Amino acid sequence: MAKRILLMGNPNVGKSAIFSRLTGAKVTISNYPGTTVGFTQGNIKLSEKEMGIVVDVPGVYNMEPLSRADEVAVNMAEDGDILVNVVDATNLERNLFLTLDLLEKQKPLIVVLNMWDETRHKGITIDIEKLGRELGVPVVATCGLSGEGIKELIEKIRQIKDSGGTQRKTLSRELKWEEIGRITASVQTIRHHHHTVLEVFEDISIRPLLGLPLAALVIYLSFQVIRVMGEGMIKYIFEPFFESVWMPLMNAVSGFLGGSGPVHDVIIGRLINGEIDYSASFGLLTTGLFVPFAAVLPYILSFYFILGLLEDVGYLPRLATQVDNLMHKLGLHGYAIIPMILGLGCNVPGALAIRLMENRREKFIAATLMAISVPCMAQIAMIVGLVGQRGGRYVMMIFGTLFILLVVKGLIMNRVMKGSSPEILWEIPPYRRPHPAAVAKKLWMRVSEFLKEAVPFVLLGVFVVNILYASGIIDFIARLFAPVLSGLWGLPKETISAMLIGFLRKDVAVGMLGPLGLTNKQLVIASTILAIYFPCIATFTVLVRELGAKDMAKSAVIMLITTVIVGGLMSLMLPANI
Amino acid sequence: MKLTELKNRQSARVAGIEGGTGVERRLEALGIKPGIEVTVISSHFWGGPVTIQVGKSKISVGRGMAGKITVEKH
């Protein structure tokens, strides 16, 4: 059986960076605690014949679990063959507590002093050999992001003997801290150093007086940069390609297929005034490729680029602290901002990050708020592209409504649900200069994830649209839902097709509103409803797993009731000719 | 006095932690324990969190929990 090598350490010490270096596997690495939820494993070659399994375990502070998430990590330690304890070299004293806990497991143990490069800037010197002698286990210094020291670590993993680590007697917590104090004093020296510009910023951005305006500025600038980059890529790269390279090819295919007929309609779509229209034809090779590549991908690229920078710099936990008291009013705490922000990219990673929330009540509130009020970037891109043509104020109406809903629903759930949101207690990592290679790698990982997950579903969506229309099923369903759609929301009954496709992909669904000839008011209402009525199937699946079927069902009821009410109110309150 | 009574940039030594062992353990895991020197680096209004410097790390503590940490100035 392959040996299991467990990477264990405090949160945000760089376990995932080491993991990715050891296995070559692609994992998300960020500068904030809790990036890794669940666990990831990958392979490593131990010798010519032997392979090992490396497991990236979520961070823990000690071996006495304080939460369910800790418990998972602690239990995993039991079935490891080799423990690799990743330690933040700039915070030796606190990290060593887990090291002493792990030594008691009497398993082969290697201590990795990670972030070694940072100790130099911080004026910290650690005598590695002496630390090795004190602990009685091999110690390696590394920098996970640059790869420094990884070779030596792999050598140490290969050489380590199966017979357990040094015999140690179990110490009480007090004695452990004493022991740690003694060890640190003997191996570490700290020189006083002057505050760097980054460190001055670290303190400013966490204080309310300057930090809150700074947070507003960071959010505003981020959205502006995402918008400008996204629009720029569409205008100068993707649209020109689809117009001057792809279009002639598609015209040729259309001509070859005879310009109409069922096969033509599925592949190329219906011709609009004798021409292919990327936003209205709805063929697999036309709309089916234009939506993910030309409309959505540019925004995905720019969003994840900015998010990656913010994550790696270490800004997000500061933002979490800044918004903590506001989030408490919504039944959450500051850290819930992280699933929400991830959800803006795609609700699936957002839903996964809901595991960061401590209790069932908070998970439920966070999931419900995200599903209702946080549209994913694919959907945002389509709304900006389609509704934006009518005027920026309509886009603002949609996002404004979603934001008001976020606040109102949060306030209500916080009131109605028993219990209260837990107190925050989290570590604020130092600001770090992002490594360009690491930022590029993470961006590539997320974009390829989008392409792998989204494109097939978009194509499936476009295909289903064709089937629905060709078979006439859509007319039947449209008549069935007409009372709600037309009577309550003032929408033409054909919008039901977009609602159906919205379960598959929200971006395609928004795109389907384009050819329906809606008024401005109808377009605003329909786009808002598409955002709030239900999550897409991919998000739904993850939420069922994270919340359990019962809570998800409750959450879904809230979503549907909200949709009926909000759609009705908008239909009543918005003037006909906005 | 309580940690929440300290002003920005004021330092003090942790004297004790009131409240159950759960709170005590969670704080201890982050290095906040009796005898340790802490410095307040930010204190939010409207019942927002207090952020303190403990050794080399910065930690945000909810106001309720921060109120359970007693400190003595020297």
Image (cartoon, coloured by chain):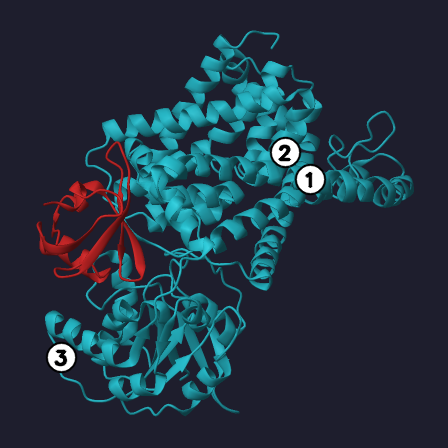
Chain colours: A cyan, B red
Sequence-first disc among 2 and 1: 1
Three-letter code for the amino acid on which mark 2 is drawn = Met
Q: Which residue is mark 1?
A: A291
Sequence-first disc among 1 and 3: 3
Residue A415 location (% of width, % of height): 24, 27
Of all chains, the one bearing label 1 is A
Of the 4 image quadrants, the one containing the C terminus of chain A is: top right
Taking the spot 43% from the left edge, 41% from the top edge, the residue there is A340
Q: Nearer the viewer, mark 3 or mark 2?
A: 3
Of the 4 image quadrants, the one containing the N terminus of chain A is: bottom left
In the rendered image of this protein, does residue A456 appear above or below residue B25?
above
Residue B30 location (% of width, % of height): 24, 59
In the displayed structure, does residue A174 sit left or right of residue A425?
left
Q: Which residue is at the front of the view, A498 or B23? A: B23
In the rendered image of this protein, does residue B58 appear above or below residue A238?
below
Q: Are marks 1 and 3 in contact (CB under 8 Å)?
A: no
Q: How many residues crowd mark 3 within 10 Å: few (<14), some (14–19), many (20+)?
A: few
Residue A295 location (% of width, % of height): 68, 39
Three-letter code for the amino acid on which mark 3 is drawn = Thr
Taking the spot 35% from the left edge, 27% from the top edge, the residue there is A409
Three-letter code for the amino acid on which mark 1 is drawn = Val
- The image quadrant of residue A419 is top left
Q: How many residues crowd mark 2 within 10 Å: few (<14), some (14–19), many (20+)?
A: many
Q: Which residue is mark 2?
A: A382
Q: Which residue is mark 3?
A: A170
Q: Is residue A157 visible in the rendered structure shown here? A: yes
Label 2 and label 1: CA atoms lie apart by 8 Å
Label 1 and label 3: CA atoms lie apart by 61 Å
Taking the spot 66% from the left edge, 37% from the top edge, the residue there is A228
Q: Are marks 3 and 2 in contact (CB under 8 Å)?
A: no
Q: Are marks 2 and 1 in contact (CB under 8 Å)?
A: yes
Of all chains, the one bearing label 2 is A
